[in-house]
Image: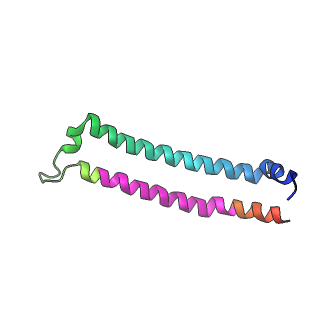
Amino acid sequence: MTPQDPERLRQHPDFIQLVRRKQRLTWSLTLAMLAIYYGFVLMMAFAPGVLAQPLNGGATSIGIPVAVVVILLSFIFTAYYVRQTNQVLDPLVAKLQQEAQQ
């Protein structure tokens, strides 16, 4: 690898596209999860009565299923990230690696 290779790679259109897509995916999922999580925490802090209401008159409150949804959304976002990485980002990485070997 010559000293010019890393700079040439940084200027490559596929590398620029890879970086932009990865950043957009990472930041959008991070911000969405932070909004969901902190929204839940703020709701517990400032409107605990909403989450404390009994579900169908039983002992379980509305807060329990809402908390489960927050946890499930984190798994769903992780699965989406892995899927996007495997289907979109990995082919770009493979293409760049192939071009770098030539």
Toward which corner of the image does residue 93 lie, by quadrant? bottom right
Q: Quadrant of the C terminus?
A: bottom right
Residue 72 lies in the magenta-colored region: yes
* Left or right: 64, with 36 as reference point: left
On the image, the x and y values in percent for residue 99 come to: 81, 62
Q: Quadrant of the N terminus?
A: bottom right
Residue range of the region highlighted in magenta in the rendering:
67-91
On the image, the x and y values in percent for residue 31 come to: 49, 43
For residue 46, above or below residue 76:
above
On the image, the x and y values in percent for residue 41 come to: 33, 41
Outermost top residue: 46
Magenta-highlighted stretch: main secondary structure?
helix
* Left or right: 62, with 36 as reference point: left
**Residue visible at 72% across and 64% down in the picture:** 94
**Residue visible at 40% across and 54% down in the picture:** 73
Toward which corner of the image does residue 88 lie, by quadrant? bottom right
